[in-house]
């Protein structure tokens, strides 16, 4: 059932105590001492190695667990490299600056958070990638919010909610395809069934962002005008700079693999840049690695536009490797398996099964920080339990997304949480209370589990 076989079988109490200790270490280090997540994860890895050695597990087996765990993130790491390149190429090509400029032209501050949520929902649904949405349109909205001097935390929450709405509901999304494939449910049947929890979460979130949006006139109109003038002075604001974004949407609909789509749209951004600035080939290579550096002389413009590059992803990549290595040790030592076996023995009702599946997905996201693994483990573990209580597999697929896909960005040390914090420069803890869609989805899926509403039973097929 699990890709990494356990070398020992710890008792439930031992496994639970270790997990609580790891959570405590992470929470204290990150929240109380404001430490970067790398250090508490490294401490947790040392704790698990010590435990394994005490249990007479050969060090070679522990090392293999670390390596096997890290392998799960190699695909994501290559995508991160190309996203770093994409951001820098879209900066030099003018795509992101033009998006920001157009935002100031057409977006009213009165419903700013609601509009940010709606736009990121549409883009996320179109391209099927939450992280790409955050790294492109999300960066533009953060720039607008900064210039208008309104809450970056709420703006980031709206961006994350919209991006993960798209990631959850798009037929182009890898997580949506993964969830339906694991439990053998038709993709579009899975998407339709998710509507029962997704649509209420969408409208509640939209109303919430509408209420929170500023209802008074922005007092810094002069600053906003200066901001727009500064963007124009860069010489990068042109209609044709939006061509790379259009290309990305087309490639996504054509189901071109993510790395190829990111590479092609990055090349498009570089080519577009030659219409307004002739970069030397060496300059282009340096920008793609180190990021684009703006030199307008306007501090707020330069701080916004100076970003991207492969090097900007190194913090994220190192943390992903550490988090997944810790996950590999948790499986090698049988800790995750021990906890799941205990949970399975307690499942007697429909509500209990759905709640356990949801908390398993949330738990894997919290402990390991890996979105795909939370979907895989939940799907593999609970198929038999759902069938025992008479539920069809599409109910399980919905739970896997409601409590797996959209929860990952809420965990500070998760793959998505780290990436979003790095790209938007807003900490996970700050935007978490305002990521309404991501918070509502698991609540609604558990609520419907206990009420029996919107569930499909085997005899109804």
Image (spheres, rainbow, N blue to C red):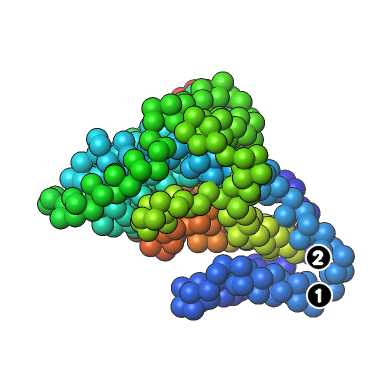
**Where 323 falls versus 167 (above or below)?**
below
* Camera-side residue of 244 and 447: 244
* Camera-side residue of 48 and 120: 120
x and y percent of residue 449 in the render?
41, 44
**Where 254 falls versus 193 (above or below)?**
above
Residue at 29 percent of width and 44 percent of height: 228
Q: In which image quadrant can residue 184 be found?
A: top right
Classify residue 237 as left or right of residue 26.
left
Q: Which residue is mark 1?
A: 53
* Camera-side residue of 440 and 393: 440
x and y percent of residue 251 in the render?
55, 24
**Where 246 falls versus 297 (above or below)?**
above
Classify residue 98 as left or right of residue 416.
left
x and y percent of residue 177 in the render?
57, 31
Residue 275 visible from this viewpoint:
yes
Q: Residues within 10 Å of mark 2 (few under 14, many from 20)?
A: many
**Looking at the rendered structure, which numbered label has been put on residue 62?**
2
Classify residue 297 as left or right of residue 46.
left
Residue at 61 percent of width and 72 percent of height: 39
**Where 247 falls versus 371 (above or below)?**
above
* Camera-side residue of 378 and 305: 305
Q: Are marks 2 and 1 in contact (CB under 8 Å)?
A: yes
Please, what secondary structure does the residue beneath circle 2 have? helix
Q: Residues within 10 Å of mark 1 (few under 14, many from 20)?
A: few
């Amino acid at each position: 059932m699990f890709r990494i076989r356990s070398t020992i079988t710890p008792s439930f109490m031992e496994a639970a105590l270790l997990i609580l200790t790891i959570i405590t270490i992470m929470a204290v280090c990150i929240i109380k001492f404001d430490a970067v997540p790398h250090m508490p994860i490294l401490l947790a890895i040392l704790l698990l190695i010590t435990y394994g050695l005490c249990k007479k597990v050969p060090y070679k087996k522990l090392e293999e667990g670390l390596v096997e765990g890290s392998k799960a993130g190699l695909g994501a790491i290559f995508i991160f490299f190309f996203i770093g390149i994409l951001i820098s190429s879209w900066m030099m090509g003018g795509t992101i600056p033009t998006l920001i400029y157009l935002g100031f032209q057409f977006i009213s501050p009165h419903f700013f958070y609601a509009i940010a949520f709606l736009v990121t929902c549409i883009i996320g649904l179109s391209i099927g990638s939450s992280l790409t949405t955050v790294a492109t349109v999300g960066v533009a909205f953060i720039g607008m919010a900064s210039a208008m001097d309104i809450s970056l935390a709420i703006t980031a929450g709206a961006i994350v909610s919209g991006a993960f709405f798209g990631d959850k509901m798009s037929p182009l999304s890898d997580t949506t395809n993964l969830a339906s494939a694991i439990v053998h449910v038709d993709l579009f049947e899975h998407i339709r069934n998710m509507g029962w929890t997704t649509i209420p979460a969408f409208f509640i979130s939209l109303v919430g962002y509408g209420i929170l949006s500023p209802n008074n006139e922005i007092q810094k109109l002069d600053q906003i005008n200066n901001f727009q003038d500064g963007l124009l002075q860069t010489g990068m604001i042109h209609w044709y700079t939006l061509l790379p974004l259009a290309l990305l949407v087309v490639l996504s609909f054509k189901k071109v693999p993510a790395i190829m789509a990111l590479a092609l749209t990055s090349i498009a951004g570089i080519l577009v840049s030659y219409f307004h600035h002739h970069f030397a080939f060496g300059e282009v290579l340096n920008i793609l690695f180190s990021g684009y550096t703006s030199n307008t002389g306007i501090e707020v413009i330069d701080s916004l536009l100076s970003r991207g590059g492969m090097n900007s992803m190194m913090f994220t990549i190192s943390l992903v490797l550490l988090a997944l290595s810790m996950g590999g040790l948790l499986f090698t030592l049988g800790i995750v398996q021990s906890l799941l076996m205990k949970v399975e023995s307690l499942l007697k009702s429909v509500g209990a099964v759905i709640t356990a599946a949801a908390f398993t997905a949330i738990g894997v996201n919290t402990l390991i920080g890996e979105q795909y693994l939370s979907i895989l483990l939940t799907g593999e573990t609970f198929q038999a339990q759902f069938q025992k209580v008479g539920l069809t597999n599409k109910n399980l697929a919905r739970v896997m997304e409601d409590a797996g896909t959209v929860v990952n960005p809420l965990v500070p040390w998760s793959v998505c949480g780290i990436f979003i914090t790095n790209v938007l420069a807003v900490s996970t803890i700050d935007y978490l209370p305002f990521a309404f869609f991501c918070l509502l989805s698991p609540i609604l899926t558990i609520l419907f589990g206990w009420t029996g509403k919107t569930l499909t039973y085997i005899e109804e097929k």
